[in-house]
Image (spheres, rainbow, N blue to C red):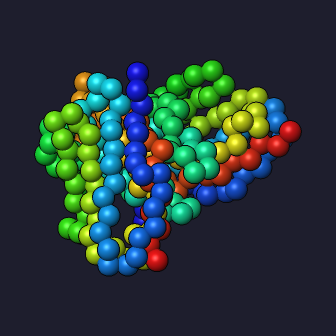
């Protein structure tokens, strides 16, 4: 079993839709949870991170972590064609140095 | 503020050859981590360098080695290349002051082994 599981999609939505991207994890020691956006043939770009459980909002993006169910979510409001990319969730234990990534979900937002 | 840069952008090597990939960390960052991303997969941690010393290693064989220089730039060396080494190699920089969870990635080097 992989430590971080993510549905690879692809996910196709119309412009303006609310997008929900999800991951599950198995390691209870994870403390930080990250979301990266990766455009085709580019490096991952850090969107936001959350420490432990709770919500974090940044513009149209909201990250949510539920440690009781080991569930990580990213919500995108008013999705735009420019949001079309692969979204990677990642987790890391405090004091450790390696990010553990999910496989990534491909998102396509069509006009 | 200068971001993470990597060179070359892409290269093609033959099985059995050796390759060196280079990374310059983001301004102010003294820690460099290397990841391998196979097609359709998430990045996998290879190793991390801090203060010119290896500071953690993932599940990769010894033919994957690295260096960090006093200016915090880094190299990834892969010996005896195998076909399965074909991937996007990413380097990420961070600083302990911000926490190693905040890792910022470069554009990657795409390696093709034939």
Numbered circles on residues, count: 0
Q: Is residue B67 above or below residue B81?
A: above
Instruction: Compare residues B68 and A1 and report the one nearer the observer.
Output: B68
Instruction: Compare residues B34 and B5 and report the one nearer the observer.
Output: B5
Instruction: Compare residues A33 and B4 and report the one nearer the observer.
Output: B4
Q: Quadrant of the N terminus of chain A?
A: bottom left
Q: Residue B34 location, x and y as percent?
A: 33, 50
Q: Residue A48 location, x and y as percent?
A: 50, 30
What residue is shown at x 76% (from left), y 37% (from top)? A81
Q: Quadrant of the C terminus of chain A?
A: top right
Q: Residue B46 location, x and y as percent?
A: 30, 56
What residue is shown at x 41% (from left), y 70% (from top)? B13
What residue is shown at x 21% (from left), y 33% (from top)? B71
Left/right placement of residue A62 relative to residue A43 reads right
In this orientation, does residue B68 appear? Answer: yes
Q: Residue A102 location, x and y as percent?
A: 49, 53
What residue is shown at x 30% (from left), y 46% (from top)? B33
Q: Residue furthest right?
A: A111
């Amino acid at each position: 079993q992989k430590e971080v599981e993510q549905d690879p999609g692809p996910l196709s939505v119309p412009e303006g839709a609310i997008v929900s991207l999800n991951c599950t994890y198995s390691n209870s020691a994870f403390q930080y949870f990250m979301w990266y956006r990766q455009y085709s043939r580019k490096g991952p770009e850090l969107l936001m991170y959350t420490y432990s459980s709770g919500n974090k909002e940044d513009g149209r993006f909201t990250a949510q972590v539920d440690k009781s169910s080991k569930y990580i979510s990213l919500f995108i409001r008013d999705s735009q064609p420019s949001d079309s990319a692969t979204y990677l969730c990642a987790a890391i234990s405090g004091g450790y140095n390696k990010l553990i990534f999910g496989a990534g979900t491909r998102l396509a937002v069509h006009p | 503020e200068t971001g993470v840069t990597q060179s070359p952008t892409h290269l093609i090597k033959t099985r059995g050859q050796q390759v060196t990939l280079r990374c310059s960390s983001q301004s102010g960052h003294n820690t460099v981590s290397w990841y391998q991303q196979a097609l359709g997969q998430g990045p996998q941690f290879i190793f991390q360098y801090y203060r010119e010393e290896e500071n953690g290693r993932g599940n990769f064989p010894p033919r994957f080695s690295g260096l960090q220089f006093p200016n915090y730039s880094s190299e990834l060396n892969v010996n005896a290349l195998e076909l399965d080494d074909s991937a996007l190699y990413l380097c990420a920089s961070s600083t302990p002051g911000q926490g190693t969870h905040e890792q910022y990635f470069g554009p990657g080097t795409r390696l093709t082994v034939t």
